[in-house]
Protein backbone atom coordinates (compact mmCIF):
# COMPACT_ATOMS: atom_id res chain seq x y z
CA UNK A 1 0.00 0.00 0.00
CA UNK A 2 1.66 3.22 -1.10
CA UNK A 3 1.69 6.23 1.20
CA UNK A 4 -0.12 9.18 -0.32
CA UNK A 5 -0.01 12.76 0.94
CA UNK A 6 -3.28 12.39 2.87
CA UNK A 7 -2.01 9.36 4.78
CA UNK A 8 1.27 11.09 5.60
CA UNK A 9 -0.64 14.14 6.89
CA UNK A 10 -2.80 11.92 9.10
CA UNK A 11 0.30 10.22 10.52
CA UNK A 12 1.85 13.64 11.20
CA UNK A 13 -1.35 14.80 12.90
CA UNK A 14 -1.56 11.71 15.13
CA UNK A 15 2.01 12.34 16.22
CA UNK A 16 0.89 15.63 17.78
CA UNK A 17 -0.98 13.81 20.54
CA UNK A 18 0.76 13.20 23.86
CA UNK A 19 -0.08 9.60 24.76
CA UNK A 20 1.24 10.09 28.29
CA UNK A 21 -1.80 12.23 29.12
CA UNK A 22 -5.37 11.45 28.10
CA UNK A 23 -6.28 14.94 29.34
CA UNK A 24 -4.25 16.62 26.61
CA UNK A 25 -5.96 17.16 23.28
CA UNK A 26 -5.00 18.89 20.07
CA UNK A 27 -6.71 21.96 18.61
CA UNK A 28 -6.25 22.85 14.95
CA UNK A 29 -6.98 26.51 14.35
CA UNK A 30 -8.71 27.64 11.17
CA UNK A 31 -5.55 29.38 9.97
CA UNK A 32 -3.31 26.32 10.45
CA UNK A 33 -1.68 24.47 7.59
CA UNK A 34 -4.60 23.42 5.33
CA UNK A 35 -3.09 19.96 4.98
CA UNK A 36 -3.32 19.41 8.75
CA UNK A 37 -6.81 20.91 8.91
CA UNK A 38 -7.95 18.41 6.28
CA UNK A 39 -6.17 15.54 8.06
CA UNK A 40 -7.94 16.43 11.31
CA UNK A 41 -11.30 16.31 9.56
CA UNK A 42 -10.59 12.94 7.98
CA UNK A 43 -9.47 11.44 11.30
CA UNK A 44 -12.67 12.71 12.93
CA UNK A 45 -14.83 11.14 10.20
CA UNK A 46 -12.96 7.85 10.70
CA UNK A 47 -13.75 7.89 14.43
CA UNK A 48 -10.14 8.47 15.50
CA UNK A 49 -10.66 11.86 17.19
CA UNK A 50 -13.58 13.43 19.02
CA UNK A 51 -13.75 16.72 17.06
CA UNK A 52 -13.29 17.74 13.43
CA UNK A 53 -10.61 20.21 14.56
CA UNK A 54 -8.75 17.73 16.74
CA UNK A 55 -10.09 17.29 20.23
CA UNK A 56 -9.10 14.08 21.97
CA UNK A 57 -8.32 10.62 20.73
CA UNK A 58 -11.14 8.09 20.88
CA UNK A 59 -10.36 4.60 22.22
CA UNK A 60 -9.66 3.53 18.65
CA UNK A 61 -7.49 6.62 18.19
CA UNK A 62 -5.41 5.84 21.28
CA UNK A 63 -4.82 2.30 20.05
CA UNK A 64 -3.87 3.55 16.58
CA UNK A 65 -1.54 6.26 17.92
CA UNK A 66 0.17 3.78 20.26
CA UNK A 67 0.86 1.38 17.39
CA UNK A 68 2.03 4.21 15.17
CA UNK A 69 4.41 5.62 17.76
CA UNK A 70 5.83 2.15 18.46
CA UNK A 71 6.41 1.58 14.75
CA UNK A 72 8.08 4.98 14.33
CA UNK A 73 10.30 4.34 17.35
CA UNK A 74 11.43 0.99 15.94
CA UNK A 75 12.03 2.40 12.47
CA UNK A 76 14.05 5.34 13.77
CA UNK A 77 16.24 3.21 16.06
CA UNK A 78 17.54 0.69 13.58
Image (tube, helix red, strand yellow):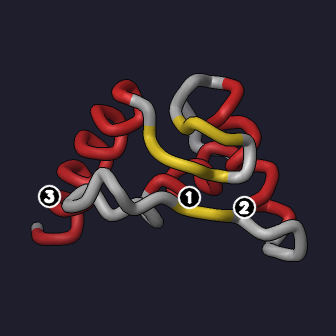
The residue pinned by badge 3 equals 74
The quarter in which the C terminus is drawn is bottom left
Q: Which of marks 3 and 2 is nearer the N terminus?
A: 2
Query: Mark 3–mark 2 contact, CB under 8 Å?
Result: no
Q: Is 61 drawn above or below residue 74 in the view shown?
A: above
Q: Residues within 10 Å of mark 1 (few under 14, many from 20)?
A: many
19 relative position to 57: left or right: left
Q: Is 45 drawn above or below residue 78 in the view shown?
A: above
Residue shown at the point (64%, 56%) measured from the top left: 9
Cα gap from disc 3 to disc 2, whole angstroms: 25 Å
Residue 73 location, quadrant: bottom left
The residue pinned by badge 2 equals 36
SS at mark 3 in the image: helix
Residue shown at the point (25%, 40%) measured from the top left: 67
The residue pinned by badge 1 equals 13
SS at mark 1 in the image: helix
Q: Which of marks 1 and 3 is nearer the N terminus?
A: 1
Q: Residues within 10 Å of mark 2 (few under 14, many from 20)?
A: some
Q: Is residue 5 visible?
A: no
Q: In the rendering, at what x and y percent does residue 29 appear?
A: 78, 69
Residue shown at the point (20%, 61%) measured from the top left: 20
21 relative position to 38: left or right: left
SS at mark 2 in the image: helix
Amino acid sequence: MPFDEDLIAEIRFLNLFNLASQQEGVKVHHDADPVLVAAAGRLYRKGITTQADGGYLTDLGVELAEHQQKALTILKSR
